[in-house]
Image: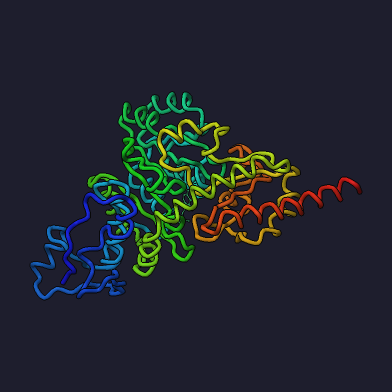
Amino acid sequence: MSNQKPKHVNARMGTQSIWGGEDEYLMQGATQVPVVHSVSFGYHDIDTWHDVALGKEKGHIYGRNTNPTVEVFEEKVRILEGAEAATSFSTGMAAISNALFTLLSPGDRVVSVKDTYGGTNKIFLEFLPRFQVDVSLIDTTDHEALEKEIARGCQVVYLETPTNPTLKVIDLKRLIDAAHKVGATVIVDNTFATPLNQNPLELGADLVLHSATKFLGGHADALGGIICGSKELIEKIYHFREINGATLHPMAAYLLLRGMKTLHLRIKQQNESAMKIARFLESHPLVEGVYYPGLESNEGHEIAKKQMRGFGGMLSFSLKGGVDSVREFLPRLQYAHLAANLGAVETIAAPPRTSSHVECTEQERAAMGIPEGLIRYSVGIEDTEDLIADLQQALDHLETALKASSVQ
Ligand SMILES: *Cc1c(COP(=O)(O)O)cnc(C)c1O
C-alpha cells in the first residue's frame, strides 16, 4: 500500500531533498520511510520470484542486492544529481573502489590528479598497479598537463573538486571534454561540493559519487557511499557491488535519509558561514594562508564561480609557526571536534596529517602540496559569530604563546 501523491518532478532541490524518492515506500499511511531489516523477501509464486530475480519485475530478493530503505536513499540522491540511475555502498571508499575496479582491467590507463582523497590516492598508488593498471597522477591545477596526459589515451579520468584538503578547483567541463575525445569514462567525487552546490553530470561527467558519510548524512552517525550516472554504467557497477558485498545497511540508509531532509538548510548555512570565516581568517596576521574557493584571491575562484552554485562548507588554513602552532591552537577551539571527519552539523577541525591523509607518508603529503601545519576546518551549522569568536580566542592564545616563546 502506498501513500499516493503526485511525483514531485518539477520541485526545486530543497523540496526534493525532503520529498524526493519517498512516495511509493510510505506504507500504510506512514509519513516516514520504514527501516526494512528483513534480509530476504519471500514469494508464494515461483514465476514472480524468478521475474524479480531476473530484474524483469520490481521487487527485492536478498538484502545484499537491494533493500527498500536503501532504495529510497539511492532515489533521493539520484534526483538531486539529475541522474538516470544510482547505486549505494557501505562507505564512500566502497563506492570509489567498486567504480574503479568495475571499469578498469589489466593494461588500462587511468588519469587523475595528485590531490584526491587519501584513500583514493592509496588505490591509485598501491592497489591498481598490482592489477597492471597504469595510473598517471598529474598536478591538480595543471589543466594543460592533464589534457596532454588524457590525450595519450585512457579508459578512466578520475576527478575530485574542490579537493581535499587544499580546496583546489578543477575545471570539470574542460577535462570532461578532453576525456570524451579519447572515449574515457569520467568519474567525479562530489563529496565536498554536494549536489546542492555542484552537479558534475550537468557538465558532462559520466559518473558522480559521494561519501554520504559527510554532507549528505550530515550528522556524523552513519557511513555510506553512492554513485550516480547512466543506467548502463550503474548496472555494471551494481553488478560488481552485489557480488563483492559492500552493501549499504538499511539502518545507515535511514539515518542518511533523515539527515538529507535538512540538506539544503545545512548547505545554505555552511556556504554562508564558510565565506565569512574565510574572510575573517584571511585578514588575521597569524594566518599564513586560507584555502577557500569563494575568496576572490583564490586561484580557483573563477572556475568555481562558473561551475558551482555555492562554494561549500569546507576550508583550510595554515598558521604561522607550522605544526607547533597547530598543536597550541587546535585544543583551544571550543566549538570544533578535533576528529577525522567532515560535513557534519558540528564544526570539525583536523590536520590532514592525522585525518584525510594519515595513510600517506610525510613525503607523499609534501608531493601533494599539503603543508604539515595545515588545518582543515569543516564548518558546522553553529552561529557564525560564535565560530568566528572561537577562532579569534584561539588565535589570541596562539599569539601570547608565540610571544612567550620568542622572548625565551
Ligand atoms: C571521506 C571521503 C571519502 C571516503 O568516504 P568514506 O565514507 O569515509 O569511505 C571519499 N572522498 C572524499 C572527498 C571524502 O571526504
Q: Residue at 27% x, 54% y: name it.
A: 239
Q: Residue at 38% x, 52% y: name it.
A: 95
Using the rendered view, name the quadrant where residue 112 is placed: top left
Instruction: Please say which color scheme the image uses.
Output: rainbow
Using the rendered view, name the quadrant where residue 184 is placed: top left
Q: Residue at 68% x, 45% y: name it.
A: 373
Taking depth in this image into account, of 6 and 86 the one nearest to the observer is 6
- The spot of residue 287 in percent (x, y) is 69, 42
Above or below for 118 versus 249: above
Taking depth in this image into account, of 55 and 73 the one nearest to the observer is 73
Report the label total: 0
Q: Residue furthest right?
A: 408
Q: Residue at 70% x, 44% y: name it.
A: 319
Q: Is residue 405 left or right of residue 89?
A: right
Which quadrant is the N terminus positioned in? Answer: bottom left
Q: Is residue 277 left or right of residue 199?
A: right
Q: Residue furthest front?
A: 385
Taking depth in this image into account, of 160 and 344 the one nearest to the observer is 344
Above or below for 132 versus 357: above
- The spot of residue 292 in percent (x, y) is 55, 41
Q: Is residue 150 left or right of residue 362?
A: left
Taking depth in this image into account, of 201 and 153 the one nearest to the observer is 201
Q: Is residue 399 left or right of residue 169?
A: right
Using the rendered view, name the quadrant where residue 382 is placed: bottom right
Above or below for 158 versus 151: below
Above or below for 61 versus 157: below
- The spot of residue 179 in percent (x, y) is 35, 30
